[in-house]
Amino acid sequence: MRRVQTALPSATRSDPPKASRVALMASRVPTVLVAVVCAVGIGALVVAGILQRVAFPDWGLANLDTEVSIATFFSATLLWATALWWLLAAATVRPRAPAIWVWWAVLAWLAFDEGSAIHEKLERWLETDWQLLYVPVMGIAALALWGVIRRYRSQPRIAVLLAAGAGVWIAVLALELVQNWGGAPVQAEIYVPTMITEETLEMIGSAVLLIAGMLALQRTVGALPENDE
């Protein structure tokens, strides 16, 4: 009697679940290249924004403090890219980490908000400072980020980048508050430099969190057997 050998279906194996093709492709994007593109893009936008304020007021698309500009599009794109990489990290990391899913959702909301200027519109409609309106969002974001940092506490580069990105965003929120202090004369004096600094730091913070997400995905996909290809 011949023995018929049959291969066990892959579902019966104890290997980690396979990463999707998108995750595999995204994990191969060079972080150095992305960092350079972000640095060049941010630098160019900041220079153009300063020139628009001091010499070329007609450069409307270079205005850093408007809801429709190249900087707004670039900032929203950075956030969408950051949300995408963290979504892929959430979908492939094992064991599953609910905090990463919440963190991705926060980033996706911020990206949508940045591109649609929702918080500015809410502030005008409700006549209430948007930072007060967004206290619940900030609370959820802080808890989710803490959970993600704890998840990657054994990966110092990722954890440090997450903490650094969060620190930069906290500085952005502080600068937003500073712009509203001291009455009209003081506001007029400090508004432009604080606004330019705030917008610059916002883009830098998003870029740092994007790099952290890229490293997290590389770590996750690299840990799978033979990259699950």
Image: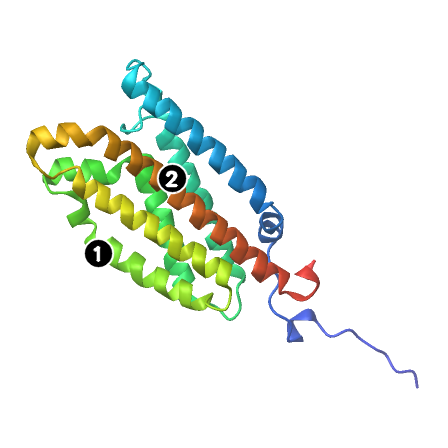
* Display coloring: rainbow
> Which of these two is toward me, 219 or 39?
39
Residue 58 located left or right of residue 183: right
> Which of these two is toward me, 161 or 111?
161
Q: Residues within 10 Å of mark 1 (few under 14, many from 20)?
A: few
Q: Residues within 10 Å of mark 2 (few under 14, many from 20)?
A: many
Return the residue found at the far right: 1
Residue 60 point in image, percent of width and height: 31, 18
Q: Regarding mark 2 in the picture, which secondary structure is present there?
A: helix
Above or below 212: residue 13: below
Viewer-nearest of discs 2 and 1: 2
Q: Which residue is mark 2?
A: 203
Name the residue: 34% across, 48% down: 168
> Total marks drawn?
2
Above or below 28: residue 155: below
Name the residue: 19% across, 31% down: 191
Return the residue found at the far bottom: 1
Q: Determine which quarter of the picture holds residue 125.
A: top left
Q: Which residue is mark 1?
A: 136
Name the residue: 33% across, 24% down: 50
Query: Which quarter of the figure is the C terminus placed in?
Result: bottom right
Residue 194 point in image, percent of width and height: 24, 35
Above or below 180: residue 161: below
* Gap between marks 2 and 1 measured at Cα: 22 Å
Amino acid type indicated by mark 1: Pro
Q: Regarding mark 1 in the picture, which secondary structure is present there?
A: helix
Amino acid type indicated by mark 2: Met
Residue 80 point in image, percent of width and height: 43, 43
Q: Determine which quarter of the picture holds residue 1.
A: bottom right
Residue 37 located left or right of residue 112: right
Residue 97 located left or right of residue 223: left
> Which of these two is toward me, 42 or 222?
42
